[in-house]
Each structure stands twice: as structure tokens, then as C-alpha cells.
Image (spheres, helix red, strand yellow):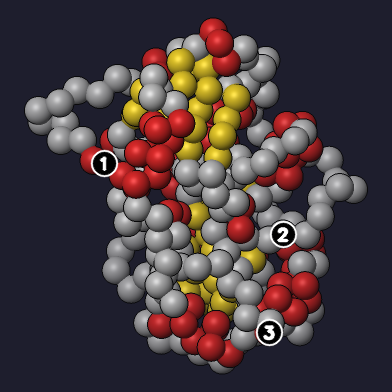
Amino acid sequence: MHRGINIAAYLRSNASRTNERVTHFGNNLGARLETREQPVACDLAIQAGFQISPAMADAMARGIPIIILENPVWHYGDKLATYSWGYNGLNGLGMAPSCADKESRPHPALGTPRDPKEGVDIIFGQVPDDKALRGKDNDEWIAEELRKRPTAEVRPHPVTIDHRFEEQEPFESVMARCGRAITYSSTVGAEALIRGIETIARHPGSWAYDVQDREEWIKDLSWRHWSTDEEIDVDWILGGYEEALELSRAGYYDNMSNGRD
């Protein structure tokens, strides 16, 4: 317990490496480790993954903050050993305290901005029905983009490809010839911005939504990334608790229900 805040960190009951993230984050914050199927009385609830588990449903019904741990934009060889975090939402719709008075944490070097005319427009599809779409139909938004940019290429998400029968161009090859990346809310948007590719992200839940200053943006994003082999800045993270609590009591939570009430 830190600052008198009773914290619960909820694990999946089945074997999952995402539990490593929850355990690391929870232990740093002095949380009680529980399973997400059995909510307990707490002031702050943490889980990995953007799903309305019984633990998240209980937290939202009681109007307390939640922290969602999710996949990172970058990692250092083991993707599941790095994670992003945010109060009350996923990625760009999760909140965090200001880090304006802090030095930047480690992050990838920003690439030189590219001229979009020197590459092709590529629309990056997402996993159909993924929570990051917040209810938007994947095929529908791709069709909308193609009406605006009929010459654009479409890169389907790899999980939608049957790799037994179809080969897909390697991701790095695609990015090397991309002049403009169009995404809905995928982390591909942030990966493209880091490379210097002009990026259009359609949903504010995207890490790449409406970025004005890449240097400031990458610094903020570096403070949203932690690895399981480091000690996190607990005082800074819990410095955002009161604001998150105020929003929670007002009913503000990002939509985990893919558009349903």
C-alpha cells in the first residue's frame, strides 16, 4: 500500500506471461495480487488487457480508477517483458501524470522525417473485433479510407492471413517503402511516427493521434513504457491517482465494450 491507497493487481487464472507484467507493476506499487474473477475491496484496480473482467466491472461500478497494462510500442528483444500503462483507458485514451519536469526515459531514436511523395500510402488493417477498434468495423473503416485514397495499398493485419497459403511482405520491407501510414488505432501508427513516416491515426485511442511535436511525444511515451527488469517510478505514477479518481467518479472510462453500452 502506498499513500494509503489500497491497490489490487489482478492476474489471469490461467497460465499467461502477461501475469509477469501485472506481478511486476503490482509488486512495485505494493498491490495485493488476486485473480480477476474474484474482485476484492480496493481503491485502485490493475490488470493486463483491455477486457471487462469481473474485476474491471467491479471497479467501474464502484467508481474507482483502473490501470490497464498493454503491449508496448517498442521492446528490447522480449515483447512480453515490456508493457505500456495508463489510468482508465487503453493507449492514447489512458491518462498519466505530466512528465514535463522529467528527463526522457530510454526510447528508440526518431528517424528523419520522410517526404510522403517518396513512398506509397499504406492503410494498416487491424484485428477484426479487437478492443482497440472501440466498436468500429475494420473492413468499414478501410473502405472509407480507400474512397479517400483509391491508390493506397492495404496491409491486412498478419492474424487475418492464412500463412499456409499466402505469403505476406515482411513488415520492415513495408515500412521502408511507406510514405504515409494510415491507421485507425494500431500501434503501427506510433512505429511509423518514430521512423519519420507521416501518419494519420483516426481514433484518439491511438498513440499516434494528432501528434504535433515528436520530441515531446516520444518523451511522454517513454514514461508510459516499463520493463519487468526495472524499478518503476511509483511516486510519479500514483501522483496521477487523485485526478484519475475524480474522472472515475464522474464515470469516465474508455470503452472496453467495442461500442456497446
Task: Give the labeled residue for mark 2.
Answer: 96
- Residue 206, x across and y down, in percent: 56, 47
Q: What element carries label 1?
A: helix
Task: Give the labeled residue for mark 3.
Answer: 249
- In the image, farthest residue toward the left: 165
- Residue 48, x across and y down, in percent: 47, 63
Image quadrant for the N terminus? bottom right
* Label 1 – label 2 distance at C-alpha: 31 Å
* Label 2 – label 3 distance at C-alpha: 17 Å
- Residue 116, x across and y down, in percent: 57, 15
Residue displayed at 47% across by 74% down = 10
Q: Which mark is residue 159?
A: 1
Q: Residue 257, relative to residue 97: is it above or below?
A: below
Along the line of sight, the residue nearer the viewer: 167 or 3: 167
Q: Which mark is residue 187?
A: none
Q: Residue 231, relative to residue 162: is it above or below?
A: below
Does 259 sit left or right of 110 as displayed? Answer: left
Q: Residue 239, relative to residue 142: is it above or below?
A: below
Residue displayed at 64% across by 66% down = 87
Q: Is mark 3 on a helix, strand or loop?
A: helix
